[in-house]
Amino acid sequence: MPELPEVETIKIGLQGLLPDKKITKVSYDHAKSFPNSWEDVQRYMVGATVTNVSRRGKTLSIELDSGYTLLIHLKMTGQLVFRSNHSSFGAGHPTDSLVNKLPDKSTRVIINLKQSGDHSTLFFNDQRKFGWIRLMHTPRVQEDSFIQKLGPEPLETTFSVDKFIAQLQKRIGSSIKAALLDQSIVAGIGNIYADESLWSAKIHPSSKVKEISQADLKNLHKELIRILKLSIVKGGSTDKNYINVEGKKGSYLSFAEVFRREGQPCRRCGSLIVKIRVAGRGTHICPTCQKLPRRGPNK
DNA sequence: CACTTGACCTGTCCGC
DNA sequence: TGCGGACAGGTCAAGT
């Protein structure tokens, strides 16, 4: 579910909430959502204080002063929601807020926190159970195979056009959509931002990487960065499940040009947006703006 | 080897 | 209203 802008929004939220809070209790049952042993959780997590929160691609890290780190991937339906139990702590939440309904049947992990007398709770909810939290020794996070495979961060200044094009050479025969979704090419792009950036750059998602001109790839690089930044400003995209740490939805989708806009007019040319299937994923395009490079229909 | 397709889960929506 | 099937933003193993 969450892609880079959503995870970044969550990271920013947690950065303002978690550091200096001490973990007092951890409740969990589903082994796949949180595979660490009860003993390890007691030893390295309970009693530890949060020192930092960071993001790499779609992965979040919550660093603890015990020398351990919680590595978190939300996959499709994961949510991290924070609730302060201290009544004078801000205005609180509306009574019908999702925040007040937690825990619920999708809650996989509950982390209780404390800071100078103020109690709070971080809920990890995940309807489809694809997401995970892993407690690991901090020095080993960088060597973790999942983290190691990740490509460059698209919002870092070192992510140049040349870097982007060089990365894409690794998937030269794939469709550009499959290449964008490959986390080892560029970290953090998912279905929404792949579709949106390809529309902006007027590239058909089924185009093979090798068929796309340098000029178009250069443009795609620019549009991708622009869109990711814009989405972060808008608090990310909420299609069905995504909410931030306060339980609030993101607003980027109201700015989306193609994603979930099938049947509606393209804002550039007026043609109706259609939904097709590329790289096994639902894919939204403007059939007029995004033409396949020469040769007939795709596949 | 390069690339594509299911499987992992649960919930929802759509057509009959 | 009920039921079957398709589909959902991610990733990896298995398949071509």
Image (tube, coloured by chain):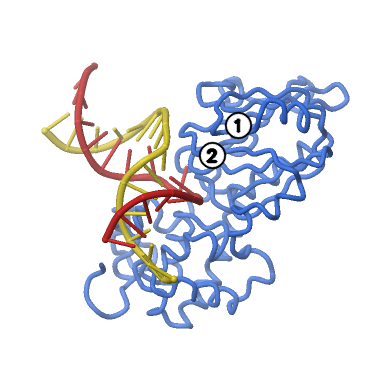
Chain colours: A blue, B yellow, C red
Q: Chain of mark 2?
A: A
Classify A118 as above or below A14. Answer: above
Q: Which residue is mark 2?
A: A131
| Residue count near mark 1 (Cα–Cα under 10 Å), binned few <14, some 14–19, many ≥20 | many
- Which residue sits at x=68%, y=29%? A122
Left or right, residue A134 beside residue A278: right
- Can residue A275 be seen by looking at this rendering? no
The reply to whether dot 1 and dot 2 touch (C-beta < 8 Å) is yes
* Quadrant housing the C terminus of chain A: bottom left
Position in image of residue C15 (x %, y %): 30, 54
As shown in the figure, which amino acid type bears the numbered disc 1? Phe
Q: Nearer the viewer, mark 1 or mark 2?
A: 2
- Can residue A110 be seen by looking at this rendering? yes
Depth check, front residue: A7 or C16: C16
As shown in the figure, which amino acid type bears the numbered disc 2? Gly
Q: Distance of mark 1 from mark 2, alpha carbons? A: 9 Å
- Which residue sits at x=62%, y=24%? A28
Tell which residue pokes out farthest to the right in this image.
A116
Classify A38 as above or below A64. Answer: above
Q: Chain of mark 1?
A: A
Q: Which mark is residue A124?
A: 1
Q: Which mark is residue A11?
A: none
Depth check, front residue: A48 or A144: A144
